Structures are given as structure tokens and as C-alpha cells.
Image (spheres, helix red, strand yellow):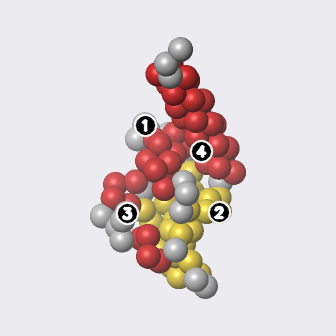
Amino acid sequence: MEEGHELTKIVIQMAPSFVKYIDSQKYNHGFVMQENIGQKVQLTFMVGFLEYFARWVISMAYIITVITPKALSDRLEVLLLSMIKKLKENKQANEPN
């Protein structure tokens, strides 16, 4: 992390059954704490680069709820829409004429 770069607090929630899939990786992504909130597990991270975190967590976009910040939700939406667009382009390019 660059000196003087502010950290962003990120809070996500997921079902307890999915935590095992990120248990070892979370430590490489600014993991701070984990707590049970009702039927969900809430994970808190402090990250220096939102883009890096977004690209890691995008593979879990279908199982997580972003609590904060809104900037992460916004970035995930842009990345996912971009992926969908690219997949459609690839599909059209590969269809026989």
C-alpha cells in the first residue's frame, strides 16, 4: 500500500455455509473481523485499493451482500455488466452465419 493512502472499510455478509470457501484467502485481502449477525456471517475488511478487492470478491457476487461502501456495490455492478457485454459479444462472434 502506498504511504498516505487511506484505507476503506468494507463490510459484507454471506451465509455461514460459504465462509469456508474464503477462509484462508480473506487474510490476504485486509480481513479485520468476522461476526455472526442473525442467519448471516458479517466480514469486515480494511483495504487500500477498492478495485483490487472488487476484482477478488466479484467471483462471490452471487452469494454476498455488500453492506458498505456503496462504491463497492457500484464497482461490482460496472464489472459484472462489462462481463455480460463481453460474453454476449463472444457468443455472437462464435455463432454461425
Q: Say which element carries label 3.
A: loop
Residue topped by disc 2: 67
Seen in the picture, residue 43 relative to 40 is either above or below; the reply is: above
Amino acid type, residue under disc 1 in the picture: Glu
* Residue at mark 1 to residue at mark 2: CA–CA distance: 26 Å
26 relative position to 88: left or right: left
Residue sticking out furthest to the bottom: 38
The mark found on residue 76 in the picture is 4
* Residue at mark 3 to residue at mark 1: CA–CA distance: 26 Å
* Residue at mark 4 to residue at mark 1: CA–CA distance: 23 Å
Q: Say which element carries label 1.
A: loop
Label 3 CA crowd tier, 10 Å (few <14, some 14–19, many 20+):
few
Residue topped by disc 3: 22
47 relative position to 65: left or right: left
* Residue at mark 3 to residue at mark 2: CA–CA distance: 18 Å
Amino acid type, residue under disc 3 in the picture: Ile
Nearer to the camera, 94 or 79: 94
Q: Upstream in the sequence, badge 4 or badge 1?
A: 1
The mark found on residue 2 in the picture is 1
Q: Upstream in the sequence, badge 3 or badge 1?
A: 1
